[in-house]
Image: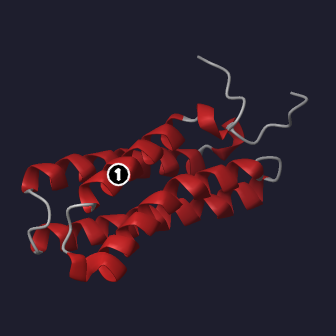
Amino acid sequence: MSVIRNFHDLIVYQKAFEAACRIFEISRSFPVEERYALTDQIRRSSRSVAANIAEAWAKKLYPKSFVNKLSDPLGEEMETEVWLHFCLKHKYITKNVYDLLISDYTEVRKMLTAMINNYTKFTKNEKD
C-alpha cells in the first residue's frame, strides 16, 4: 500500500478529477442555450467533488471536521448524477456515456462513503 502524502494521492480524488475532466469535454457539445444552465451546473458540481475532497483532506487532523467536510463532495457527486440524468433525458449524451459516467460516480460515492465510515484510517495524528 502506498503512502498518502497529500490529497493528490487519494484514489477517490484522482477518480473524481478524471470524471470531472470527462464531463468538461463532453459538455463542450451541449447546445448553446444550455451554456448558463445545465452546462455550467454540471461542470461546477463535477469539479466541486474533487475540490471538496481536497478541502476535507486539509481537515484530516480534526476527525469531526474531516467527516463533516466529506459530506460536501458526496452531495456534489449526487448533484452531478442528477445533471447527468437531465443530459440523458434531453439526449445531450448517449446511454453508453451516461452509464460510463454514472459508473465512475458510483465508484466515487462508494469510496467517499467508505472514507466517512472508516475515517480513523485517514485522520490519524501525523506523529503516528
The residue positioned 53% from the left and 43% from the top of the image is 13
Task: From the top left corner, tell me how far across and down residue 99 is, in percent.
Answer: 17, 51
Task: From the top left corner, tell me how far across and down residue 41 is, in percent.
Answer: 39, 74
Residue 85, by quadrant, is bottom left
The residue positioned 48% from the left and 58% from the top of the image is 47
Say which residue label 1 marks.
105
Residue 45, by quadrant, is bottom left
In the depicted view, which residue is nearer to us: 45 or 116? 45
* Residue 110 seen in the current view: no
The residue positioned 31% from the left and 77% from the top of the image is 35
Specify the farthest residue to the front. Answer: 32
Say left or right for 99 vs 105.
Answer: left
Q: Quadrant of the C terminus?
A: top right
Q: Report the amino acid beneath label 1.
A: Tyr
Secondary element at tag 1:
helix
* Residue 29 seen in the current view: yes
Specify the farthest residue to the top. Answer: 1
Residue 126, by quadrant, is top right
Task: From the top left corner, tell me how far across and down residue 79 is, in percent.
Answer: 38, 70
Task: From the top left corner, tell me how far across and down residue 89 is, in percent.
Answer: 11, 73
The residue positioned 59% from the left and 16% from the top of the image is 1
